[in-house]
């Protein structure tokens, strides 16, 4: 089994302290946003499941911008395609994710159903 095929092992195997937060939780509480911004390693789970609004998009853009500027590693999980991602979020966020990350497309099949 590949390491990246087992999300439950990511935080357990990380060599640094990792935080695991959903995009929904980050948008709902400022304290979660600040914790996500400062985490040495962040797993941002279920991007795209939060309510679609300008305020939430701005919050997530701030999070990605801070992590990008400080070079903090971020793992993002989402059921969005890259095309859906680029339409839903600001171009700066989309470009930062493309520039600083390896994109792993697991296909259309949900990993939850396997």
Image (cartoon, grey):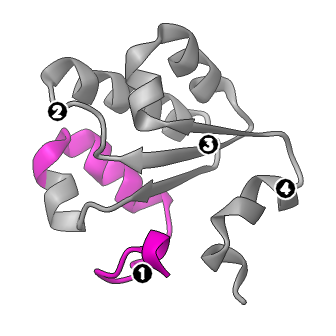
- What residue is shown with label 1? 106
- What residue is shown with label 4? 12
User: What's the residue at 50%, 82% (across, down)?
Assistant: 114
Where in the figure is residue 83, as x and y percent of width and height?
15, 65
Mark 2, secondary structure of its residue: loop
Is residue 2 covered in magenta? no
Where in the figure is residue 6, as x and y percent of width and height?
67, 72
Q: Using the image as rendered, state which of residue 7 and residue 74 is in the foreground.
A: 7
Where in the figure is residue 8, as x and y percent of width and height?
70, 61
Which residue appears farthest toward the bottom when viewing the image? Answer: 1
Q: Where, by quadrant of the figure, is residue 19 drawn?
A: top right
Is residue 95 covered in magenta? yes
For residue 100, above or below residue 58: below
Callout 4 crowding tier (Cα within 10 Å): few <14, some 14–19, many ≥20: few
- What residue is shown with label 2? 52
User: What's the residue at 22%, 55% (across, down)?
Assistant: 85
Where in the figure is residue 73, as x and y percent of width and height?
64, 49
User: What's the residue at 32%, 62% (across, down)?
Assistant: 79
Callout 3 crowding tier (Cα within 10 Å): few <14, some 14–19, many ≥20: few
Mark 1, secondary structure of its residue: loop
Mark-to-mark CA distance, 1 and 2: 24 Å
For this view, does 25 lie left or right of residue 48?
right
- Magenta segment: 87-114
- What residue is shown with label 3? 71
């Amino acid at each position: 089994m590949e390491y990246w095929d087992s999300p439950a092992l990511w935080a357990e195997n990380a060599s640094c302290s990792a935080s695991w937060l959903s995009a929904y939780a980050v948008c709902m509480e400022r304290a979660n946003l600040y914790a996500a911004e400062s985490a040495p390693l962040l797993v941002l789970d279920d991007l795209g499941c939060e309510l679609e609004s300008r305020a939430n998009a701005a919050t997530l853009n701030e999070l990605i911008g801070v992590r990008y500027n400080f070079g903090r590693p971020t793992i993002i999980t989402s059921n969005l395609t890259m095309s859906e991602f680029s339409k839903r979020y600001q171009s700066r966020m989309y470009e930062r994710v493309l520039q600083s990350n390896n994109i792993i497309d697991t296909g259309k099949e949900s990993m939850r159903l396997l």
